Image (cartoon, rainbow, N blue to C red):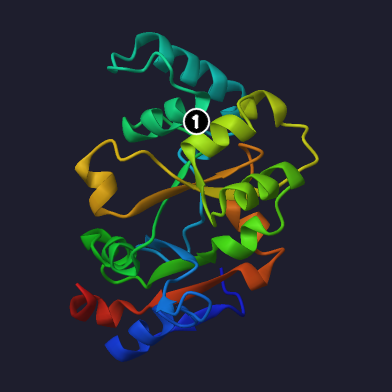
Amino acid sequence: MKTPEDIKVNSWNDLIEELYLDSWQANIERYRSHYAFRGLSNKGYKLETTLIRIGDKCYDLEIHLLRNFIKYAKIENSQNYSIWNWLVMARHHGLPTRLLDWTYSPFVALHFATSNIEQYETDGVIWCVDFVKMHEILPDEFREALIKEGSDVFTVEMLSKTSPDFLQKFDKNSKDNFALFFEPPSIDERIINQFALHSTTSNPKTILNDILTQKPELYKRIIIPSSLNELYR
């Protein structure tokens, strides 16, 4: 997929400049990027969830997969888990879900864009999505929840209060088509070390690309030439 937002970097300096472009926030007088980053080893890969990769039956399977996971998973102190907690745990344990992994760290994303030896001769990509701008166009109930908390990104606790019946509310016939980002609980060192956050869509069949291409101001793609893989690794 070639879009006007694709930026091909040809040096380490070019990469750093693009990754941290517009990260200075004058209101707090510090550098803090509004981008969520996702690195892929092939620039042609889509932002597909593991649930979408199942195929056309993904919507019908989602609730059954999650129900069985909740029934059989042996997770301590889970009696008060919301659907959002269970989604995170299911994703963590490899169950297909509508969640997509992202990171606050551009260098974690760079690692995933360049570490696949099988794709070493292929250009990689770092997707950069402005989650602040994305959240500004959310339905009212979600925007108001962020404003109330004075936050730019959701937490599991916030979503549990705002939309406890998320999977039931947004079915395959939903006219709404949006995405949001949230921080998972720090359940292990991997999530902490990778500065993780997740995205999810209101419709499990929706590929995030389809939302982003309708709103090009929300994202950019930094192309990592295969010729520079060794340098970046």
- Taking the image as drawn, is residue 28 in sight? yes
- Give the x, y percent position of residue 114: 27, 67
Residue 4: quadrant of the picture: bottom right
- Give the x, y percent position of residue 146: 61, 50
Asked if residue 230 lies left or right of residue 174, the reply is: left
Secondary structure state at the residue bearing disc 1: helix
Relative to 197, is 27 above or below? below
Query: Label 1 neighbourhood size at 10 Å, few (<14), some (14-19), many (20+)?
Result: many
- Give the x, y percent position of residue 64: 53, 16
Residue at 26 percent of width and 48 percent of height: 192
Relative to 38, is 155 above or below? above
- Give the x, y percent position of residue 202: 65, 40
Residue type at mark 1 is: Trp
**Quarter of the image where the N terminus is located:** bottom right
Asked if residue 93 lies left or right of residue 167, the reply is: left
- Taking the image as drawn, is residue 171 in sight? no
Q: Which residue is the site of mark 1?
A: 84
Q: Nearer the viewer, residue 227 or 173?
A: 173
Residue at 36 percent of width and 17 percent of height: 78
